[in-house]
Amino acid sequence: MPFPQSFYRWRPHPWHGLEVGEDPPEIVTAYIEITPYDHVKYEVDKKTGYLVVDRPQRSSSQPPALYGFIPRTFCGPQVGALTPKASRGDGDPLDICVLSERPINRSEVALRAHVVGGLRCIDRDEADDKIVAVLHNDNVWGDVNDISELPSAWVERLRHYFGTYKMIPGRPSELTVEETYGRETAFAVIRAAIEDYEMEYGG
């Protein structure tokens, strides 16, 4: 649906008002909600677009990368169909983690991200993929094209973070990291999330 003219007088909603990217699925916009320096998990409120406190991080581990979402994406039936063990997508915008050589220590920023792979995650029975990217034109990581080219220790930290960040003491984690995948699979997930968004909200 087209936005009313008055929409453009105000700051756009980060999910619906920003562009998906200049060359998706390879180069996308990432809207950053939390940084590797945050001990609190923040997320964008779907109604207002403001960044709100979701919860304090339960464990001592911190996200090893910038973490946010790709605007104008939605994890619905198309995304869910790509994960055999999931019954559906999680109903959120598609998550993305971005590696940067220089510290970016504030959230609520948008950046260009070069997609290199992803993590296939399941939160209960919902697909909850985490796209992995590097900052576009980064001086150290900018030439990386696939997740296999990243340090294995960093990828393992990413897997460990998402495998434990929702864990409640005395209970098994509700989120499991099923596998790590490369850029071509990540591209397919992003295309599916764009299609799901168009089906849910219009072009």
Image: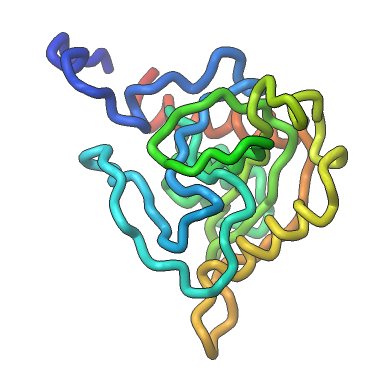
State whether residue 102 is above or below residue 57. above
Q: Residue furthest left?
A: 6
Number of numbered discs present?
0
Question: Nearest the camera: 194 or 78?
Answer: 194
Q: Residue at x 58, y 40 (%)?
A: 103
Q: Residue furthest bottom?
A: 170
Residue 95 at what x, y percent from top left? 53, 43
Quadrant where the image shows the N terminus: top left
Question: Nearest the camera: 27 or 62?
Answer: 62
Q: Is residue 116 left or right of residue 40?
A: right
Q: Which residue is drawn at 67% across and 40% down?
A: 132
Name which quarter of the figure residue 153 lies in. Answer: bottom right
Q: Residue at x 39, y 18 (%)?
A: 203
Q: Which residue is drawn at 42% across and 58% down?
A: 41
State whether residue 119 is above or below residue 172. above
Q: In this view, does 99 lie to the left or right of 168?
A: right
State whether residue 153 is above or below residue 30. below
Name which quarter of the figure residue 150 lies in. Answer: top right
Residue 172 at what x, y percent from top left? 59, 81
**Rendered image coloring scheme:** rainbow
Residue 46 at what x, y percent from top left? 29, 43
Residue 138 at what x, y percent from top left? 69, 26
Question: Nearest the camera: 136 or 23?
Answer: 136
Q: Which residue lies furthest to the top in this view?
A: 5
